[in-house]
Amino acid sequence: MKKIGVALLGLGTVGFGTYKILTDNKAEIEKKHGVSIEVKHILEKNPKRAEETGVNPRLISTDINNVINDPEISIVAEFFGGIEPARSYLIACLKAGKSIVTANKELFSKHWAEFNEVAEESGAGIYFEASCMGGVPIVRTLTAGLQGDNILSIAGIFNGTTNYILTNMADNGEEYGAVLKRAQDLGYAEANPSADVDGFDSMYKLSILASLAFNKKVPLNKIYREGISKISKEDIERGKDFGYTLKLIAMAKNKGKIDARVHPMFVENSHPLASVKSSFNAVVIEGDNVGDVMLYGRGAGDLPTGSAVVSDIVYCALQKEYKRFGFKKESDKDYATDFVSKYYIRMTVDDKSGVLAKIAGVFGKYEVSINSMHQKPLSGGVSSIVFLIHETSELNINKAIAEIKSLNVLKEVDALIRIF
């Protein structure tokens, strides 16, 4: 039986989940896959904490050279998070001919090309299934399950924290700040929640997945990003009146030019993404032959993410030759500078005659077509108006909104939310 030695860099939540799966399921993995995988070393800056988990202390050290110089270790799985020292350690492991497995989406989205270059020289493999959606096997689906299709689009809920927040705002009528605080208390959100609520986490994942889907690097600076921190309970409730559920959606389309973005969107209640609740993730892939394929599952956590890491370790151990992702060199002309969407726009305006005509006139000037509108009188001589806009370009919407803001009948443009 083939024997494979593995090192784990970090023994936090996911690192320990991976260790537990590799040890508890060792016999089952050997039986099903014909490979014996043994954890040879664990790099952990806090050895005492690692020992408290019950891990054999003889496996633990704080020196990366113990991994690099061990000929019995052929696969290294990284769980540090952040950029350094994870980047330097993985580069050193690749140079030593050791294949790497990572769940670090920020690191991988920013340094994928560098890892590829080093791996090409040393012959090592690179695996990153757990970097995108925890236990949901999206990377393997794109790389080994849809060879018969050209991928036209990929879209979904890539971040469990924001989905938990939006679900509770919708189901319980709570405001953003209160739900965020509870998410932090429960450990769903960090003390500094920016990576999640400002859309960075989803952006990193979209960069990786869109690059795989379209076989062309989709860099972070080509992805439009907008978070959920300005979402109000009012808009979630008004959206319900139109049959919509609000989600933070990451999406990319390839229709000649690549359009990639992360932002809140209203999703029709009949669409499967609308029913994805709490901290679950989901993604819909559109192929030119297969049509829509949807994957759903837990996008974070020790065992779900550890499951994806172990899947990569086993998959890597069974390969005789490692797949490379040599993306075509991108240029600015490959990416869309504008995109098309439907829109929900909420405004507070003077409650008097002629207001709607003025606003409609500006919309018409910029070829923005109103699908429907709903007006709700408020106190103080003002009204709240929601416009649903037919599909139009973002540039036209922005021009129209800029001119509407100059009208003396407008009090505030309260929200602009795209519709899926």
Image: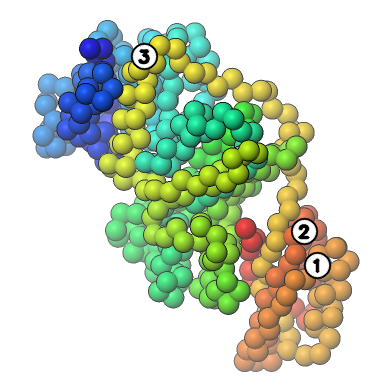
Q: Secondary structure at mark 2?
A: strand
Residue 392 badge: 2
Camera-side residue of 8 and 410: 8
Label 2 Cα neighbours within 10 Å, binned few <14 / some 14-19 / many ≥20: some
Residue at 42% from the left image edge and 33% from the top image edge: 129
Q: CA distance from mark 1 to mark 2?
A: 8 Å
First in sequence: mark 2 vs mark 3 = 3
Q: What's the residue type where badge 3 is placed?
A: Lys
Identify the residue at image location x=37%, y=48%.
298
Colouring scheme applied when the structure was drawn:
rainbow
The three-letter code of the residue at mark 2 reads Thr
Q: Which residue is mark 3?
A: 98
Up the image or down, 366 lies above or below 51; here it is: below
Instruction: For the residues labelled 1 and 2, say whether their Cβ atoms are less than 8 Å apart.
Output: yes
Residue 196, given in percent of the width and then of the height, sits at 45, 51
Q: Secondary structure at mark 3?
A: loop
Q: Quadrant of the N terminus?
A: top left
Q: Earlier in the sequence, mark 1 or mark 3?
A: 3
Near mark 3 (Cα within 10 A), the count class, few <14, some 14-19 or many ≥20, is many
Query: Which residue, given by chain and number where applicable, does mark 1 sit on?
Result: 369
Which of disc 2 and disc 1 is earlier in sequence?
A: 1
Q: Position of residue 11 (x, y in %)?
A: 24, 33
Pointers 1 and 3 in contact (C-beta within 8 Å)? no
Q: Residue at x 50, y 40 (%)?
A: 205
Q: Tell which of 239 and 287 is nearer to you.
A: 287
